[in-house]
Image (tube, helix red, strand yellow):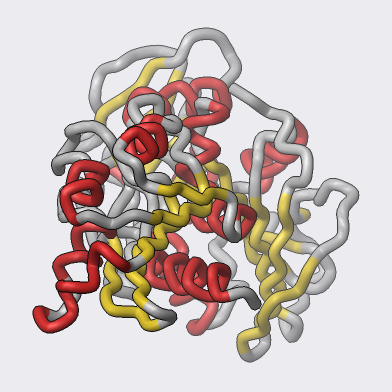
Amino acid sequence: MLDSEKYMFRCCELAQAGAGSVAPNPLVGAVLVYENQIIGEGFHTQYGAPHAEVECLHNVPEHLQQFIPLATLYVNLEPCCHFGKTPPCTDLIIQSGIKKVVVANTDPFPKVSGGGIRMLQAAGIEVITGILAKEGSWLNRRFFTFHEQQRPYIILKWAQTPNGMIGSLQGERMLISNEISQRKVHSWRAEEAAILVGYRTAMADNPALTTRLVPGKNPVRLVVDFQRTLSSQLQIFNGAAPTVLLNELSAAPIGAAIAFQYSGSDWIKGVNNYCREANLQSVLVEGGAATLQSFINLGCWDEIRRITNTSLYFSEGISAPVLPLMQATKIESMLSDQIEYFINPIQKYKK
């Protein structure tokens, strides 16, 4: 690995520590290097807090600050050049006297979009781009999808038996995943802006859809209920987390939830429209089978996370969604539960 890649990898490693805390901002890490030694590093810790570049420069020890103008700054995303929750990072970089900045990805956010790089170059700073660009894009895939495709990044998740059953025909709730994978799912929830279920799942399972098993912020709970048939007594309407009822009939609230009325019968377009308006950059879809299959059939998904309990069987039940024709990559196993990840190579659904 080249030195530039090694330091950019460290940027990405640092940035990941902000997962679940910085949205709708991107994940960003920064490393300051002088004579092949890291003299400062930092990452964006939470939304509204100082950006990675600011943290990095502030973390340089006092006895090393004299070397800042001679050092190279590595950052996985183009420094911002506009006033938002914080001042522009480009101003601080220019004021610091740094003469070289290495970037993985340009920022697709319209208020930046190459402007940060141009501002640095206009100040006489050498800017190198594209170092570990693929890794940087994957790190910020939610942010990139939202701004480039004008829709949230969509993750489909379900648990099934080895013979492809996702639930009982009688309607009772079936615990297919084990305690370890349940905690894993709750950690997934903490990383996403929103979590979504259809009305049948909300009615049959009465899920809380929170991160109660792990530390972390609850996602916004989205429930698709075309005709507003759900009872306001369900857990999803209890006010424990923000909840939105997506429906065709009315914008009147239900329980502690607000409602979003979409036009026509294309409820997936309604989901995307609401997320775009509310600045929700990612959605974890947890069911039910028909809801998940609808996203698959339209190609409106980016990742699939399938949990298979290899020791639980029942002969009859609700069939799991049918995957598109693509190769699965198994990345980890947890006790009796096997977790497989799938990536959509096409991502054809734009809106």
The residue sitting at the top extreme is 264
View extreme (bottom): residue: 335
Residue shown at 62% from the left, 74% from the top? 2
Image spot of residue 148 (x, y percent): 54, 30
In the rendered image, which quarter is residue 54 located in? Answer: bottom left
Q: Nearer the viewer, residue 72 or 295?
A: 72
| Left or right relative to 333: residue 249 | left
Which quadrant of the figure has residue 20?
bottom left
Tell me if residue 274 comes above or below residue 191 in the rendering.
above
Image-based side of 152 in relation to 253, left or right: right
Image position, residue 32 (x, y; %): 33, 69
Q: Residue at x 55, y 81 (%)?
A: 178
Whether 20 is drawn above or below 180: the answer is above
- The answer to whether any part of residue 203 appears in the image is no
Q: How many marks?
A: 0
Furthest residue in direction left, as rendered:
62
Q: Which residue is at the front of the view, 185 or 57?
A: 57
Does the rendering let one see residue 148? yes
- Residue at horizontal 36 percent and vertical 62 percent from the top: 73
Seen from the viewer's position, the closer of residues 340 and 177 is 340
Question: Which of 158/288 is in front?
Answer: 158
Give the farthest residue toward the right: 325
Query: Can you give x and y, in whole percent of width and height, for residue 13 in the image?
Result: 45, 72
The quarter of the displayed image where residue 53 is located: bottom left
In the rendered image, the vertical position of residue 61 relative to residue 200, given as above or below:
below
Q: Quadrant of the N terminus?
A: bottom right
Q: Residue shown at 47%/34% (left/top)? A: 108
User: x and y percent of residue 199 in the render?
Assistant: 49, 38
Would residue 63 appear left or right of 186 to someone viewing this image? left
Identify the image quadrant of the C terminus: top right
